[in-house]
């Protein structure tokens, strides 16, 4: 068919499975196991439906101002979007247009190469070392931009600020994006580096630590010049990207700092406890500083474990890809959910020992 000659064809990003079964345990998409701040639910019930007949504020001023106040930056340094995926996609479209390949890790968030291919941006991946860490010297080569998550996904490894700054400092002629979707679970944000580097863009999300994946709120913080360029592209694409409820509820989430920190604290405590339980079962994993654990076992393949857990209505993430095909990414859920996960893994091991294949 001739019309297909004019179609842009791409291989899409594959999200984690989204089952909807009674009694299931969903640990495959790094969602928060706890509800958002109480004020979010209260305001959700109080939103005037008649307000929805009007377009939302295209600048999301209330949310932008709340984020600027919380992170102690100028409102002109904040950009918001429909989840961090929207923000990152807009950043690819805006900043990675130099013709030279952009750089990102070989094991990382699997949306990066999808956006690069969609926007026809050349790219090159840089291999993580044997301990799953970034090799900063790999990013000291000519390039058209740099992006990496910190902590990384799916490994959960956190790079220290010295490593982050080394990469930013070596790339002053391009934009460096640090994707901090998981930074609240145990790392130091690169935000202080913004005072020294106007080519640095930091992206975060409400989907993980603020328990609002269903609202789709993401944001970027950078120099006013960077944010200005992002807004120019946004307003050339779609002025009304963020709906009214998301803006209002996002502000409520930002303002309840005590609840935010309590939620993060519970997840971190559970993560550390579950690490010990997994070690007792013979699992090994990098020292995750995210809300998930990237675990492997020397006796049982990740695919076997993935299928066994799935039969038990416990969903984790598995990729049949080079270097990571024998690891499972396990989101940290509630204590009760994680206890059931550990029990299921133990039962599987006991069964295999009794009846080896």
Image (tube, helix red, strand yellow):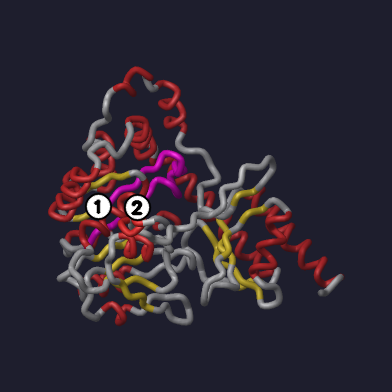
Instruction: Tell me where residue 25 appears, x and y as whole percent.
Output: 64, 48
Q: Which mark is residue 7?
A: none
Give 187 or 340, whichever is nearer the viewer: 340
Disc 2 crowd rating (10 Å Cα; few below 14, some 14-19, many 20+) is: many
Quarter of the image containing the N terminus?
bottom left
Instruction: Tell me where residue 333 appears, x and y as whole percent.
Output: 58, 50
Rendered position, 57 above or below 76: above
Report the residue at 44% width, 71% height from top: 107
Tell me if residue 149 can be seen.
no
Mark 2 or mark 1, earlier in chain: 2
Give 271 or 313, whichever is nearer the viewer: 313
Range of residues picked out in magenta: 200-220
User: Where on the picture, by quarter, is residue 162?
Assistant: bottom left
Apparent side of residue 230 relative to residue 132 in the rendered image (left or right): left
Disc 1 crowd rating (10 Å Cα; few below 14, some 14-19, many 20+) is: many
Q: Which residue is mark 1?
A: 221
Q: Which mark is residue 204?
A: 2
């Amino acid at each position: 068919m001739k019309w297909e000659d004019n179609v842009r064809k791409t291989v899409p990003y594959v999200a984690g499975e989204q089952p909807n079964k009674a009694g299931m345990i969903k640990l495959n998409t790094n969602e928060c196991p706890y509800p958002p701040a109480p004020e979010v639910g209260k305001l959700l019930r109080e939103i005037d439906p008649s307000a929805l007949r009007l377009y939302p504020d295209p600048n999301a001023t209330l949310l932008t101002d709340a984020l600027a106040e919380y992170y102690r930056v100028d409102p002109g340094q904040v950009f918001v979007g429909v989840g961090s995926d929207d923000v990152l996609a807009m950043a690819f479209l805006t900043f990675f247009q130099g013709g030279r390949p952009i750089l990102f890790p070989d094991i990382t968030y699997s949306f990066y190469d999808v956006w690069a291919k969609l926007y026809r941006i050349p790219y090159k991946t840089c291999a993580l070392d044997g301990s799953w860490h970034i090799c900063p010297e790999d990013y000291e080569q000519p390039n058209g931009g740099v992006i990496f998550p910190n902590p990384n996904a799916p490994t959960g490894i956190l790079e220290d600020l010295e490593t982050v700054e080394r990469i930013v400092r070596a790339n002053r002629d391009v934009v460096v994006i640090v994707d901090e979707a998981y930074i609240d679970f145990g790392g130091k944000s690169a935000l202080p580096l913004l005072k020294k580097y106007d080519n640095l863009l930091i992206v975060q999300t409400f989907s993980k630590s603020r328990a609002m994946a269903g609202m789709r709120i993401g944001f970027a913080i950078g120099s006013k010049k960077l944010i200005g360029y992002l807004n120019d592209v946004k307003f050339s694409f779609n002025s009304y990207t963020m709906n009214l409820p998301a803006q209002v509820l996002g502000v409520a989430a930002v303002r309840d700092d005590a609840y935010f920190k309590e939620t993060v604290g519970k997840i971190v405590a559970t993560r550390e406890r579950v690490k010990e339980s997994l070690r007792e079962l013979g699992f090994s994993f990098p020292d995750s500083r995210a809300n998930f654990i990237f675990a492997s076992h020397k006796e049982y393949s990740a695919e076997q474990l993935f299928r066994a857990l799935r039969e038990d209505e416990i969903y984790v993430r598995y990729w049949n890809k080079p270097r990571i095909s024998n690891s499972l990414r396990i989101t940290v859920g509630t204590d009760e959910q994680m206890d059931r996960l550990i029990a299921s893994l133990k039962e599987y091991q006991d069964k295999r020992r009794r009846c080896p294949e």
